[in-house]
Amino acid sequence: MQDSTITVQGRVASDPEMKVSKNNKPFTSFRVAATPRRQVTGAPGTYEDGETSWFTVFAWGNLGANVLRSIEKGQPVVVHGRLSAREFKRDDGSMGTSVSIVAHGVGHDLSWGQTAYEKVSKPSYGTGDRLDDALQTLHSESEGYGDPQRDDYLLAERPTERPTEDRAEGQTDDAGASATGPLVEEPAA
């Protein structure tokens, strides 16, 4: 099967969230809005915005852990990955299309500013529990990651700025997350 790859330059439209597939594989998802800007013909120095394209981005494994800790809503990014589109039926019966990217690479768009690179020896989703252990085994497993748009998943809280290693056992952070307790919650019914 031939994969379609795409590179998108846009703005992060939603804060990245860590999720867990039904196979217990952690990933990060976020939305990107890409709006082309073109110079108006015959009017030098005048530009107009084109139609905005919306993408849901899924980043697995180490990439997902690093994305979760590196990007925020509103920041300019460049995303490269495998393009996927699917049709779905809305509650009112009308049809819609969802376009997603399974990211191979994500980074800040440096044409808009500067960023600092920090190499980490062990990428972490920041939970300090079984999800971080699962992250270390992702690359050694041959099975697929599942489909985040179709599979059920659990939602975990975004980690705080302080890694869990800095908290004593039983101590909680401002969001109430314990250094020893998992952050994974069941989805709301």
Image: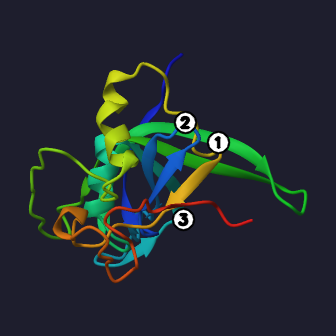
Between disc 3 and disc 1, whose residue precedes?
3
Q: Marks 3 and 1, how far apart in space?
A: 30 Å
> Dot 3 corresponds to which residue?
51
> Dot 1 corresponds to which residue?
151
Q: Nearer the viewer, mark 3 or mark 1?
A: 1
Does 63 appear above or below 157? above
Using the image as rendered, state which of residue 163 and residue 48 is in the foreground.
163
Q: Residues within 10 Å of mark 2 (few under 14, many from 20)?
A: few
Q: Residues within 10 Å of mark 1 (few under 14, many from 20)?
A: few
Using the image as rendered, state which of residue 112 and residue 46 is in the foreground.
112
Q: Position of residue 161 (x, y in %)?
A: 24, 73
Q: Secondary structure at mark 3?
A: loop
Labels 1 and 2 touching (C-beta < 8 A) = yes
**Residue type of the residue flagged with mark 3:** Glu
**Residue type of the residue flagged with mark 1:** Asp
Label drawn at residue 23: 2
Q: Nearer the viewer, mark 2 or mark 3?
A: 2
Q: Secondary structure at mark 1?
A: loop
Q: Is residue 79 visible?
A: no
**Residue type of the residue flagged with mark 2:** Asn
